[in-house]
Amino acid sequence: MARPSSPSPPSSRPAARRAALAVALSALGALTACARGPATSPAATAVSAPSAARTSVVSAPPAAETSVVVSAPPAGKPSATTTPSPAPHGTRCRTFELRASVGRKDPGAGQENHPVVLTNTSTRTCTVYGFPGAAFVDASGRQLGPDPRREPESPARVRLAPGRSAWAGLSYARPEISGARTATPAALLVTPPDEREPLRVPWTAGKVPVGGNESRVSLTVLRPGSGA
């Protein structure tokens, strides 16, 4: 008669279960590692990818070089666009610095002669050179007769200190002798040499020739003095 087999001791069963669980967990870990693939280390990533800071430093110029202006001129020297100072007008007498007058008549043989005087009323010394302009006008400002003809003379520069004068001779044939057509001017307009604005001088010497035979009026260059 056979003997019945003895059952396993109760203490050996939990140990067998723990061993089986450990084997299952180990197999599961191996499968998870295969699915993820090989790990990439942070150090390898940093080496293979260029850093943003390194890229910005290479492409941007240094701040000190950007601030340098190569085309700027050295200090104390004018640039190419500097406008030069205007040249002074020189020593020429301007219309507003002068007073015009007609001196005392000096009659000659069949001639009327009048000194046309320019006086420096400014506080500086200035000069006049050549012929003044002269024209007889009526009360409305309309010119009477042609412009005086200039005598063939060589001009000289006249230096006028404040208060000093220069004069030019205005001459014409006496109308009662020449038979020229006449008019009585209201004024004589006198324009200083190289100026455009005239000075108005009241005319008190009577009739002057304005047309017809022997109606020519002549004018000399300016010379020092008042012609008296």
Image (cartoon, helix red, strand yellow):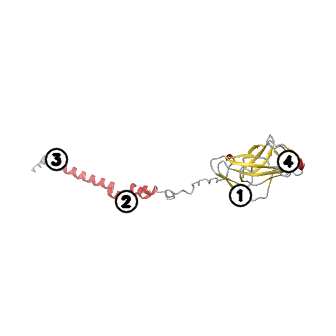
Residue in the image at 71% along x and 49% along y: 118
Give the crowd class for mark 3: few <14, some 14-19, many >=20 residues within 10 Å.
few
**Depth check, front residue: 203 or 85:** 203
Residue 89: x and y in percent read 64, 52
Q: Of callouts 3 and 4, which one flags the residue occurring earlier in the amino acid sequence? A: 3
- Residue type at mark 2 is Ser
**Depth check, front residue: 39 or 153:** 153
Q: Of callouts 2 and 3, which one flags the residue occurring earlier in the amino acid sequence? A: 3
Q: Are marks 1 and 3 in contact (CB under 8 Å)?
A: no
Q: Of callouts 4 and 1, which one flags the residue occurring earlier in the amino acid sequence? A: 1
Which residue is label 3 attached to?
14
Give the left or right position of residue 164, taking residue 10 as reference: right
Give the crowd class for mark 4: few <14, some 14-19, many >=20 residues within 10 Å.
many
Q: Are marks 4 and 1 in contact (CB under 8 Å)?
A: no
Residue in the image at 46% along x and 56% along y: 66
Which residue is label 4 attached to?
209
Which residue is label 1 attached to?
156
**Mark 2 to mark 3 CA distance (whole Å):** 52 Å
**Mark 4 to mark 1 CA distance (whole Å):** 29 Å
Q: Of callouts 1 and 2, which one flags the residue occurring earlier in the amino acid sequence? A: 2
- Residue type at mark 3 is Pro
Residue 27: x and y in percent read 26, 53
- Residue type at mark 4 is Pro
**Mark 1 to mark 2 CA distance (whole Å):** 94 Å
Check disc 2 and report its element: helix, strand or loop. Answer: helix
Residue 98: x and y in percent read 69, 47
Which residue is label 2 attached to?
48
Residue 60: x and y in percent read 44, 56
- Residue type at mark 1 is Ala
Check disc 3 and report its element: helix, strand or loop. Answer: helix
**Mark 3 to mark 4 CA distance (whole Å):** 157 Å
Check disc 1 and report its element: helix, strand or loop. Answer: loop
